[in-house]
Image (tube, helix red, strand yellow):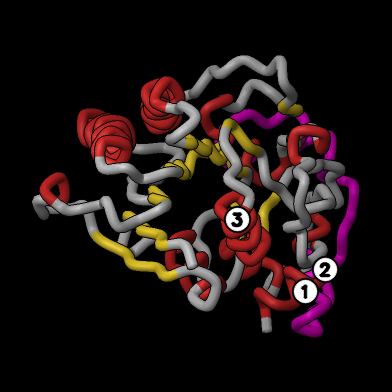
Amino acid sequence: MKRVLVTGINSYVGNAFIQANQDTFQIDKISLRNVQWDRMDFSGYDVIFHVAGLAHSTPDESQRDLYYRVNTDLAAETAIHAKKQGVKQFIFMSSVIVYGSQHETIDRKTPLQPDNFYGDSKKRAEEMLLPLADEHFKVVIIRAPMIYGKGSKGNYPRLAKLARRTPVFPNYPNQRSMLYIENLSEFVKQCILNNVSGIVFPQNAEFAGSKDIVAEIAALHHHTVWFPTCFNAWIRKMKGTTVRKVFGNLTIDPALSKMDFTYQLYDFKESIRRTEQ
């Protein structure tokens, strides 16, 4: 049984992984905040799953230095420490935010153009981690789309709250890549079991639009929502972060997400049902 150390004691992703895989691996977790973690002995672990970090798509400028310290420097320092002590695999939780918001489709040729220092801090971490990889030290960079599930934060709970209350929501045709938390936990498990290395792009098997999410949640809660198209022309003219997050397109080329193992355990409808139950 492989030994896995999760760095980030309060991480939603980390805790979900532990809950799903505690019978598959021997898992410990630690906080990297305010402790002398660099004096810890990592030699007993096969894998480090690094989920410690700061996440906010529109961070305050006053936190710039903190983001680079935590998201960039700490990730690199942890990986270097792990490699020196014989850890075989380092899995880093990154995000499609490294691409910025100027692209509607992500493929092999899409350049990294982060919008702000949050995205740039992740990009720089990747650039420091990848050169550490060799035949004895596998580095996995997970560029994940929007992650959702029971207890998640971000756009999903806001849409879910709206779906349970609003009588009207625009029938606007957008598509986004999404990643259900249990699918992500399975993905990380399989990366460990299969000794994966490199940049990977897990996502659900289907794309989904905001209207699809709202409709599915509303139906589960027996709430009726009208989906008119009369707002669409207005939405197309609108600019700004909020409109882009709700009605913009951001999909990952499915070819990037194909692996030699199965990890998409739950389809879109079932994932929403499990989240809302």
Of residues 163 and 89, the one nearer the viewer is: 89
State left or right for residue 222 relative to residue 16: right
Q: Which residues are magenta?
A: 214-243
State left or right for residue 246 relative to residue 42: right
Q: Amino acid at mark 1?
A: Ala
Residue 66, by quadrant, is: top left
Of residues 195 and 48, the one nearer the viewer is: 195
Residue depth check, mark 1 versus mark 3: number of the one nearer the observer: 3
Q: Residue at x 75, y 40 (%)?
A: 257
Residue 150 percent across, percent down from the top left? 58, 73
Residue under label 2, please give it: 269
Q: Residue furthest right?
A: 229
Residue 238 colored in magenta in the image: yes
Q: Which mark is residue 193?
A: 3
* Crowding near the residue tagged with mark 3, few <14, some 14–19, many ≥20 C-alpha atoms within 10 Å: few
Q: Residue at x 52, y 55 (%)?
A: 154
Inter-mark Cα distance, 2 to 3: 28 Å
Residue 270, by quadrant, is: bottom right
Residue under label 1, please give it: 218
Residue 229 percent across, percent down from the top left? 90, 48
Inter-mark Cα distance, 2 to 1: 12 Å
